[in-house]
Image (tube, rainbow, N blue to C red):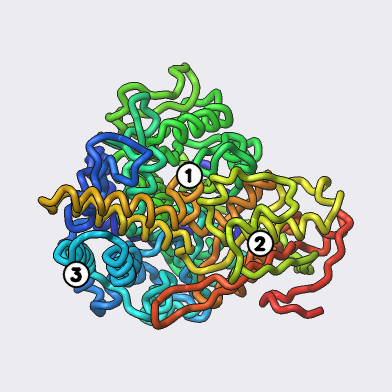
């Protein structure tokens, strides 16, 4: 057995836990992987109203054509609520999954760190589906009055419509778990931090489906800089709401029969949910504390796709770039857990990037989404957990579903293994994990087995970097309309149909980013776009979510009337009014609207328009999102000073009475190090301390 070489500040995984469909613990999850147990079923009636279902795939309609899901059973959810003593108003699924995963995880850590140096940083791309129901509930009276006032029908027929609204909304709201203090998804971190004395940093990071790996990336930075001694990272997801199904239906992304990653017969993805958490320590601390070291994270890196045809369409160049950042030229690994969603375009693009970068090696490739579906914010976490268990059991689980793989049948090259592969017990395993997100964000993580015969080397010193602001631009969102976007003299054009469907915060972020870029003049052309990152800061749930939900209400009431009313003339009048007078007031549901509901796409859209290939994500820490994101940027620049950040800070207000956020303004800042600024002839106008405070 050859001796291993690690740095003292390499990152060890000392504990893990999971709450996943069909597996409320890692042991059962592994059994499901080895047996290739398919857990995908039609979603329960309790969570999706079937009158919204279309019998045919028609993306021109606001209808859902597939109800497949991989969901956590209601009985399991109720058990988590009970085991964690959650109050009724705090017991939505996102909270229940997170608290249960923490309940499993924390006892595994043998020696706890100082609470003030213990962080909780989780990946999350969606609030709980309860927020969608809350919007519907709040809008019920408004829409009732609007419809019945305008419709030219009898009073008895108006009463029928009112009663239909009551029936529809009350049925959806019967299990609602949203209180004033739990409106923000990030509030669950505050409650968890107090319960488990995780009193260091805590926030949510949204890199869409790559959120789990993005959280680990940020946690690793804090550990290497000595800001933290223990980081709880990973991903959480619970949103299997009507809006998510409708969005995926409108872009034709849902599977009709099953999840078949990298198979020629695949036709889409299947949505999933869950929570997967990891406890991370510096390797020398983990050895000192007598921890079980399940694996060492050698490296994790991110990239953006740059300019592409669509924010839903991946880019092989961006994916190859993230491999290069992790491996350099040393691309030898024993297994690759791919992103592998099952969408034909996504799988083909990922297959191409894998085949090119990992050529000339017989490399097994798999995707846990074939049995669990796509857990979105928790998807990368499930992939990492699978790899940790591969290391533990020295076995690569099979993918027997793969009848016609899209990987080339070459003597040497990546392939989907249909049968299990036993691994040598005396060889040091290295495994890679892909996690790619909507909006063009990519992450890759390299995991290595820890075998005990180890030399720990001193890491390279991390010299303190002077960080500052090159310039900034602030514009108000209060009176900004989509039509205003066309009044700016911008060097790029978005089609009017795209502008009409794009979230206003995203549009204004493009404008303020151009303000800052324009001020640089020709200098901008000399800055390598691979070195430009984009980070936004605001609470999850953009205004586009509310627009989507209103359209959802209209489709629900029309569909419910068609299913229940014997008076077909009244049904036709109602449907006609909804289509002509209500839906046109809200953004249409298309690819731009679909990505508009995701916070990470504020940054992703800027990266797309300006052809940038650095990292992109969103930080959510409630009203403290901006300072949390600025500190994260400061940390990143300490570790890698040779880059520039476009920071998009969204000032927000919160209407406690209506439980809704309002976006007030967007401030874009170009932030970098003194070293990088000097190299590209920029001047730092404001300097920042490690706590992101201006010192000059």
Q: Dot 3 lies on which element? A: loop
Residue under label 1: 591
Q: Which residue is drawn at 43% across and 74% down?
A: 660
User: Which mark sits nearer the N-terminus, 2 or 1?
Assistant: 1
Q: Dot 2 lies on which element? A: helix
- Picture coordinates of residue 99 (x, y %)? 32, 70
Quadrant in the picture for residue 19 = bottom left
Task: Decide if residue 128 is in sight here.
Answer: yes
Q: Which residue is drawn at 47% across and 42% down?
A: 431
Q: Which residue is drawn at 76% across and 60% down?
A: 516
- Picture coordinates of residue 657 (x, y %)? 39, 82
In the rendered structure, find residue 261 and report the number of the disc placed on it.
Answer: none
Disc 1 to disc 3: CB gap under 8 Å = no
Q: Distance between the residues labelled 2 and 3?
A: 45 Å
Q: Nearer the viewer, residue 124 or 64?
A: 64
* 590 left or right, relative to 577: right
Q: Nearer the viewer, residue 224 or 183?
A: 183
Q: Which residue is drawn at 75% across and 78% down?
A: 694
Residue under label 2: 636
Q: How far apart are marks 1 and 3 (CA)?
A: 32 Å
């Amino acid at each position: 057995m050859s001796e291993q070489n690690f740095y003292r500040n390499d990152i060890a995984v000392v504990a893990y836990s999971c709450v996943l469909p069909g597996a409320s613990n890692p042991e059962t999850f592994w059994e499901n992987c080895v047996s290739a147990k398919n857990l995908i079923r039609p979603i329960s009636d309790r969570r999706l109203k079937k009158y919204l279902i279309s019998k045919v795939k028609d993306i021109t309609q606001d209808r859902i054509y597939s109800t497949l899901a991989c969901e956590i059973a209601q009985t399991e959810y109720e058990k988590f609520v009970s085991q964690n003593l959650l109050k009724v108003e705090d017991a939505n699924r996102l909270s229940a999954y997170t608290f249960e995963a923490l309940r499993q995880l924390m006892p595994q850590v043998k020696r706890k760190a100082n609470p003030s140096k213990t962080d909780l940083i989780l990946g999350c791309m969606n609030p709980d589906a309860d927020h969608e129901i809350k919007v519907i509930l709040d809008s019920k009276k408004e829409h009732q009055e609007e419809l019945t006032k305008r419709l030219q029908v009898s009073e008895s027929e108006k009463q029928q419509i009112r009663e239909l609204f009551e029936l529809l909304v009350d049925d959806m709201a019967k299990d609602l778990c949203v209180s004033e203090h739990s409106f923000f998804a990030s509030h669950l971190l505050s409650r968890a931090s107090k319960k488990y004395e995780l009193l260091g940093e805590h926030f949510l990071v949204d890199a869409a489906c790559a959120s789990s790996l993005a959280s680990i990336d940020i946690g690793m930075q804090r550990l290497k800089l000595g800001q933290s001694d223990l980081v709880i990272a990973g991903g959480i997801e619970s949103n299997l709401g009507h809006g998510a199904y409708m969005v995926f239906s409108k872009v034709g992304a849902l599977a009709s029969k099953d999840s078949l990653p990298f198979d020629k017969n695949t036709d889409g993805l299947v949505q999933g949910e869950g929570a997967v958490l990891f406890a991370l320590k510096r390797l020398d601390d983990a050895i000192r504390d007598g921890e079980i070291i399940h694996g060492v994270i050698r490296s994790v890196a991110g990239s953006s796709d740059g300019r592409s045809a669509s924010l839903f369409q991946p880019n092989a160049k961006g994916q190859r770039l993230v491999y290069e950042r992790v491996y350099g030229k040393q691309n030898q690994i024993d297994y690759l857990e791919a992103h592998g969603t099952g969408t034909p375009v996504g799988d083909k693009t990922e297959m191409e990037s894998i085949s090119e970068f990992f050529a000339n090696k017989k490399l097994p490739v798999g995707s846990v989404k074939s049995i669990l579906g796509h857990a979105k914010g928790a998807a990368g976490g499930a992939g990492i957990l699978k790899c940790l268990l591969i290391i533990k059991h020295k076995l690569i689980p099979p993918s027997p579903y793969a009848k016609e793989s899209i990987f080339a049948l070459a003597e040497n090259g990546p392939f989907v293994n249909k049968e299990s592969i036993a691994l040598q017990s005396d060889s040091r395993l290295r495994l890679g994990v892909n996690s790619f997100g909507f909006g063009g964000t990519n992450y890759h993580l390299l995991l290595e087995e820890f075998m005990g015969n180890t030399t720990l080397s001193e890491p390279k010193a991390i010299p303190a970097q002077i960080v500052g602001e090159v310039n900034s631009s602030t514009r108000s969102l209060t009176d900004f309309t989509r039509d205003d976007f066309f009044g700016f003299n911008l060097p790029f054009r978005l089609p009017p149909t795209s502008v009409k469907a794009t979230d206003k915060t995203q549009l204004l972020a493009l404008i303020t980013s151009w303000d800052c870029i324009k001020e640089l003049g020709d200098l901008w052309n000399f800055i390598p776009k691979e070195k430009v990152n984009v980070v936004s800061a605001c609470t999850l749930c953009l205004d586009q979510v509310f627009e989507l939900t209103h359209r959802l209400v209209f489709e629900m009431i029309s569909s419910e009337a068609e299913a229940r009313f014997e008076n077909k003339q009244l049904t036709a009048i109602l449907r006609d009014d909804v289509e002509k007078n209500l839906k046109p007031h809200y953004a249409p549901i298309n690819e731009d609207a679909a990505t508009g509901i995701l916070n990470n796409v504020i940054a992703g859209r800027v990266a797309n328009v300006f052809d940038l290939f650095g990292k992109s994500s969103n930080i959510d820490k409630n009203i403290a999102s901006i300072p949390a994101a600025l500190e994260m940027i400061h940390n990143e620049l300490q570790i890698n000073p040779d880059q520039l950040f476009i920071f998009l800070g969204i000032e927000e207000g919160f209407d406690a009475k209506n439980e809704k956020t309002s976006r007030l303004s967007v401030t874009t800042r170009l932030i970098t190090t003194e070293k990088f600024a000097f190299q590209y002839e920029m001047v730092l106008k404001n300097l920042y301390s490690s706590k992101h405070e201006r010192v000059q």
